[in-house]
Amino acid sequence: MHTREELRARQRDVFFSISLIFTSSPPSKWSSVQEKTILVSGVTGYIAAQIARAFLDAGFKVRGTSRSRSSTAILTEGPLKSDFEAGRFEVVEVPDITVAGAFDEAAKGVYAIAHTATPVSMSFTDPEPILHAAVNGTKSILESSLKAGPQLKTVVFMSSIAAIVSNNEPPYTYTEKDWNNVSEALVSQLGKNAPGPQIYIASKAAAEKAFWKFRDDNKPSAVYAAINPVLVTGPPLALPKDPANIGETVRNIWQILSGQEHPPPLIPGGAFYVDVRDVARLFVWAVQHPEEANGERYIAFGEPGSEQRIADVLRENYPERRNVIKEGSPGVYPPFSGIGVDSSKAIKATGQAFIGYDQSVLDAAKAFEVYL
C-alpha cells in the first residue's frame, strides 16, 4: 500500500519521464539528419525538383538556387509549400551560375551539394554559350564548395549518359568506365552548324570532365560522385501552367495522352529511359553513403522506351480515351541496335531496381490529367 506522498512522487517521476520524451533531443539518425542542409542548384528544374523532394523526404533541409526567386513560386506555393513555410526548404537567387563566387553564399554551411543547374535542350543552335555555361557553371559551384566550410561532406554532380556514350560500333555495352571523347571535337568543328542534340551532348561531356579535373587539381576533402542518367521520364514534381512547357524528355507522354500525333523520337531508333524519382534516389544514396560513392560514376537506366510504347500503355490504361489517343502501330517497337547500357553498378550499390518504363509513363500521365 503506497502512501499519498509516494503516489505523488511516482506521478512526478512519470510526468518527468514523459516530458523528456517530448522535450529532449535523444541522439538519432533522423534528428542528426534534420540539422543538415543540402544545396540543390537549379532547383526548379524537372530533375532537380524531385531531388529536392527526395532529400526532404529523407529528413534533410534543402536550400535551392534559381536564377530568379519569383520562378521558385512553382515550388514554394506548390508541392514544397509546407516545407518552405516550416523553414525546411529555402531559396537563394543565383542570376548567373558562371560568375565567380556566384554560389558562395548559397554554399555556406551546407552538408552536401547536388549540382544540376545547366542548360538543357535538344534545340540549341550555338555551341559556344552552352558549353561555356555548362563548364563554368560547374567550376563556379565547385570553387564555392571550397569555401562552404568543413561540414561539407559530399558533392554529387548531375552528369548524363551523354558523357559516356561515344561512337563504338555494335555490339557494345557502355559502362561507367567509358567516356565520350568525340562530341566536343565534333561540335567545335561544326560550330553553329552542329545539331542541337550534339551541342547538348558535348556540353554534358565537357562539364563532367571539368568536374573530375577540379577534384584532381584541388584535392578537396569532400567526396565527389557523378550520376549519369539516360533520358529521364516520369512524373514532374510541379507542373507548368502551359503543358507546352513540360520538360522535353517527358513531354511526349502528354502529347500522346492529349491525342496529338506521335512526336518524333528524341533519339532516332528509340531511347533508353530512367524514372526521375530513381535519379533523385541515387543523389540521396550518394550523400548517405559517401565512402562507397567516393570518386564513382553511376549510370541510371531503367528500360528502353518509345512513343509507340507510350501509346500502347495509355490506350490500355485509359479506355475512355482510346478514341483520342492515336493508335499508331501497336506492339511495333524499335529493334535492339546492339548498343546497350549497363546500370548494374547502381542497382548493386543501392540494392534497389529501377522503376519500370510503363509505370513511369502511367505516373506521368496521372500528373498530366489536370490538363485534360
Image: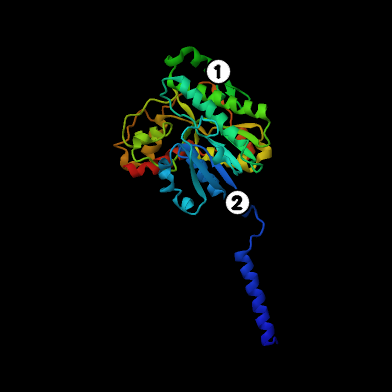
Is label 2 in contact with label 1 (beta carbons under 8 Å)?
Answer: no
Give the tally of numbered discs.
2
349 left or right of 48? right
Q: Secondary structure at mark 1?
A: loop
347 left or right of 95? right
> Residue type at mark 1?
Pro
Quadrant in which the C terminus appears: top left
- How many other residues sit within 10 Å of disc 1, few (<14), some (14-19) or many (≥20)? few
Q: Position of residue 129 (x, y in %)?
A: 46, 23
Q: Position of residue 235 (x, y in %)?
A: 44, 40
Picture quadrant of residue 46: top left
Q: Which labelled disc corresponds to residue 170?
A: 1
Q: CA distance from mark 2 to mark 1?
A: 49 Å
Q: Give the residue displayed 48% in from the left and 32% down from the top.
A: 96
Specify which label sits upstream in the sequence, 2 or 1. Answer: 2
Residue 5 vs 263, above or below: the answer is below
> Residue type at mark 2?
Glu
Q: Give the residue displayed 41% in from the left and 20% down from the top.
A: 125
Q: Give the residue displayed 66% in from the left and 87% down from the top.
A: 4
Quadrant in which the N terminus appears: bottom right
Residue positioned most to the left: 323
Task: Work out whether residue 9 can be spotted.
Answer: yes
Q: Which labelled disc corresponds to residue 114?
A: none
Task: Work out whether residue 335 can be spotted.
Answer: no
Q: Secondary structure at mark 2?
A: loop
Residue 88 vs 216, above or below: the answer is below
Q: Which labelled disc corresponds to residue 35?
A: 2
Q: Nearer the viewer, residue 45 or 197?
A: 45
